[in-house]
Image (cartoon, coloured by chain):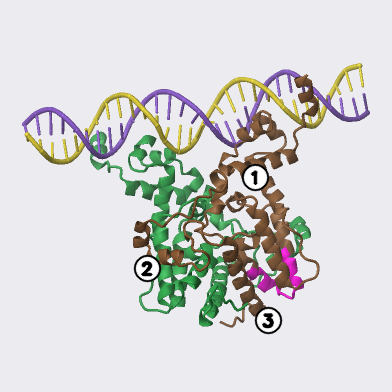
Chain colours: A brown, B green, C yellow, D purple
Amino acid sequence: MAEQAETLRRVPLSRDRILRAAIALADAAGIDSLSMRNLAQELGVVPMALYKHVANKDELIAGMIDMVVGEIDPPLPDADWKHTVRERVLSARQALRRHPWAPLAIESRTTATPAILAYLDSVVGTLRAGGFSTDLAHHVMHAMGSRILGFSQELFDTSRHAGRSGPANSDPPAELPPKFAARFPHLAEIATAASHDDGSVVGQGCDDQFEFEFALDLLLDGIERLQQQRWTSSHRPR
Amino acid sequence: MAEQAETLRRVPLSRDRILRAAIALADAAGIDSLSMRNLAQELGVVPMALYKHVANKDELIAGMIDMVVGEIDPPLPDADWKHTVRERVLSARQALRRHPWAPLAIESRTTATPAILAYLDSVVGTLRAGGFSTDLAHHVMHAMGSRILGFSQELFDTSRHAGRSGPANSDPPAELPPKFAARFPHLAEIATAASHDDGSVVGQGCDDQFEFEFALDLLLDGIERLQQQRWTSSHRPR
DNA sequence: TGAGAAGGTGTACGGCGTACACCTTCTCAG
DNA sequence: CTGAGAAGGTGTACGCCGTACACCTTCTCA
């Protein structure tokens, strides 16, 4: 009976079901524990069964990335380029923060996935519609770098490494050990003197969202200035 | 005789020799082919011998990173903060470009290495000496992100992936396939219309160094403006 | 209805990091 | 000079990993 029920309710494997399970697994346990074997077990299936739906592990991860990138909101219909890009990037940030393993997975790949290309293409479209030359639009995309996908490559940031081996550890900010302060006095200073509720720069005491928007606006404001003065790479006012 | 000669000339293993060999191997063959077994073979020794000098592979890579980061030039003695930081970052960029595997290795780690902390501390010191508040210095460090170590997290950039599986492939820029242009028209446009000698944005046709300095100066100029107007996070003029 | 396609299974291979017990070689106090 | 102990190199083995390949089952449709 249990067997029959099981048989009846057995959902057949599919690429989509595999990708969703893989994302759930990576979200929960970290991408390091996403192995074909683990994933298969999660799906109640033998490892090799997966290969009937995904070519290999690399293609599996590409699929996961595409699914995550697909969560980014479409552009606002009627707004100036700056507002549109800003909101889009913040939406990207939200999407990627739901999946802490994603940034490193994206960076580790040698080729961009179709969904990433589509997203980038759309952002360029926004800039062009906003009056940017192809030239300036090009440099802007480079200047934004990975920030355009909602993550800044923070060297301090521990949260993005949550996806490496498990969910975020919410240890208390943890005092800076005295040896640290002695060896790296300037880091210690900005860590302890941070204006927003005191946190450790090496720990996760500071407000990631604030830092992200700070950098984003620094870039957008600078870009706006360049655009207003009709910047071109041949004649640059510097 | 050969045996005796061999014995005489046998250099004993050492942490330093291991790190140098590991870096050479990663530079030449990509970090993916840096295994304890490969490395041991390169050194004419059995894999487990390495563990008498490095705790494990993770610590090995940390050591490699520290060695690379140690190649960054010290700060200029007498110059304004902007010039000093700019030169320092460009020096970091040069150092890391000699070791294409390094950026990803750095990002993949959960904890910063001592040499990285020392470098960051020194940059903060430059800012502080230049009159930055701890507050602004803090945000600036976040805003620069990984760019401060000389790499921008380019989604387009293929060169940094050279370190993944081998030395840079110097394929010709390769025409954009028509399907690409059809599906991603805006990307195709900025790729083909790039002002500096036409290259592909997905390929490696554009001038990385130019793009890097473009972004770096965009940030530095914006930061300079903030500092001149005595920006603080509580009262921010935006 | 029955052939062929699509999808799940089992076994096996060659790689990986590294624990652990062992053996060799060097160093230096007595 | 000697011999004990430390430091450093070796060999074997374990449990992971991705995935090739042959096989078997189940579903689909002419």
- Indicate which disc, 1 or 3, sits on the residue closer to the N terminus: 1
Question: For residue B198, what is the image quadrant?
Answer: bottom right
Query: What's under tag 1, amino acid-wise?
Result: Ile
Q: Camera-side residue: A220 or A94?
A: A94
Q: Which quadrant: the C terminus of chain B?
A: bottom right
Q: Is residue A172 visible?
A: yes
The residue to which callout 1 is attached is: A61
**Image vertical order of residue A131 relative to residue A183, above or below:** below
Q: Main secondary structure of the magenta part?
A: helix
Percent x, y of residue B39: 41, 42
Percent x, y of residue B127: 44, 73
Distance between mark 1 and mark 2 Cα atoms: 40 Å
The residue to which callout 2 is attached is: B74
Q: Secondary structure at mark 2?
A: loop
Q: Is residue A133 magenta?
A: yes
**Image mark for residue A26:** none
Q: Camera-side residue: A169 or B74?
A: A169
- Magenta-colored span: A123-140
Q: Chain of mark 1?
A: A
Distance between mark 2 and mark 3 Cα atoms: 37 Å
The residue to which callout 3 is attached is: A228
Q: Secondary structure at mark 1?
A: helix
Query: What's under tag 3, amino acid-wise?
Result: Gln
Residue at 65% of width from left, 45% of height from top? A61
Q: Chain of mark 3?
A: A
